[in-house]
Image (spheres, rainbow, N blue to C red):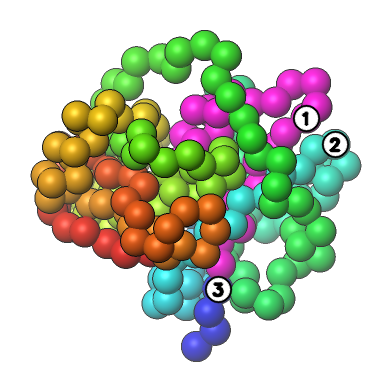
Amino acid sequence: MTERVLPLVVRIERAAPPERTDALEAAATAVLSLLDPLQDQRPAWDEAISEWEDHRIRKVVRRARGAEWRRVLELPGITVTVRTAEVRVHPPVPLDDWPKDLSRLQVSGTDLADTAPPPSATGGAVLWVNPHLDMTAGKAMAQAGHGAQLAWWGSDEPARAEWRDRGFATAVRTASPDRWSALVGSGLPVVRDAGFTEIEPGSATVVAEAPWLRLGVFEV
């Protein structure tokens, strides 16, 4: 069975880069949109998604602008817009066989910032980010995507249906140190990174919180 990785592309135009939190939330929502079996294009991607989920659920975030972004839009995928951010998720691709228009995109350069406080989180799930880790926006987007996926796996069908009706509402926030300690010990789904880039293997990066979630810890 082929090991695959999930490509996420964030649009970063020089004149108007997205807010960091918007990009993280768009990445999380994009992953949920791909996983949703009711998504129109999903049947064509079932085999690729199954092969991907049978290994580590690796995600790679790349950036695009201008003509690069227009070429990305021509490839199979789903585009999600959250306020200032546009993120496109593509069906999982083999680790060593990316489409040319994705493989040529840069991984670095996704260092975004928030220029204003994000809006209040209402309804849906909240993905809490570890306040003790220093991650680039691209790395944090991948971790938010992992957290959203663990929340999806931890949801039963009625919860998924209600979440879908809310447009997969998902907030991403950085926890305070005290809250983070409590969350990690709460039994909620915890993302522990494999350590391929930026941070130490086994680092807890994100905790997914929602009223309906089953308890569990997952390693990605």
| N-terminal-most mark, 3 or 2 | 3
Q: Are marks 1 and 2 in contact (CB under 8 Å)?
A: yes
Task: Give me the C-alpha separation between circle 3 and circle 2.
Answer: 27 Å
Between residues 56 and 167, which one lies in front from this camera angle?
56
C-beta proximity under 8 Å, tags 3 and 2? no
Residue 61, how many percent across, how many down? Answer: 61, 51
Q: Nearer the viewer, mark 1 or mark 2?
A: 1
Q: Which residues are magenta?
A: 5-29
Q: What label sits on residue 66 in the rendered view?
A: 2
In terms of secondary structure, where does tag 1 sit? loop
Q: Which residue is mark 3?
A: 4
In terms of depth relative to the viewer, which is nearer, 36 or 184?
184
Callout 2 amino acid? Gly
Task: Measure the C-alpha gap from mark 1 to mark 2.
Answer: 7 Å
The image's mark for residue 13 is: 1
**9 drawn magenta:** yes
Q: Position of residue 15 (x, y in %)?
A: 80, 21
Identify whether 51 is placed above or below 27. Answer: below
Q: Which SS class for mark 3?
A: strand
> Can residue 128 be seen at all in this image of the molecule?
yes
Label 1 with label 3: CB-CB less than 8 Å: no
Label whose residue precedes the other's in the sequence (1 or 3): 3
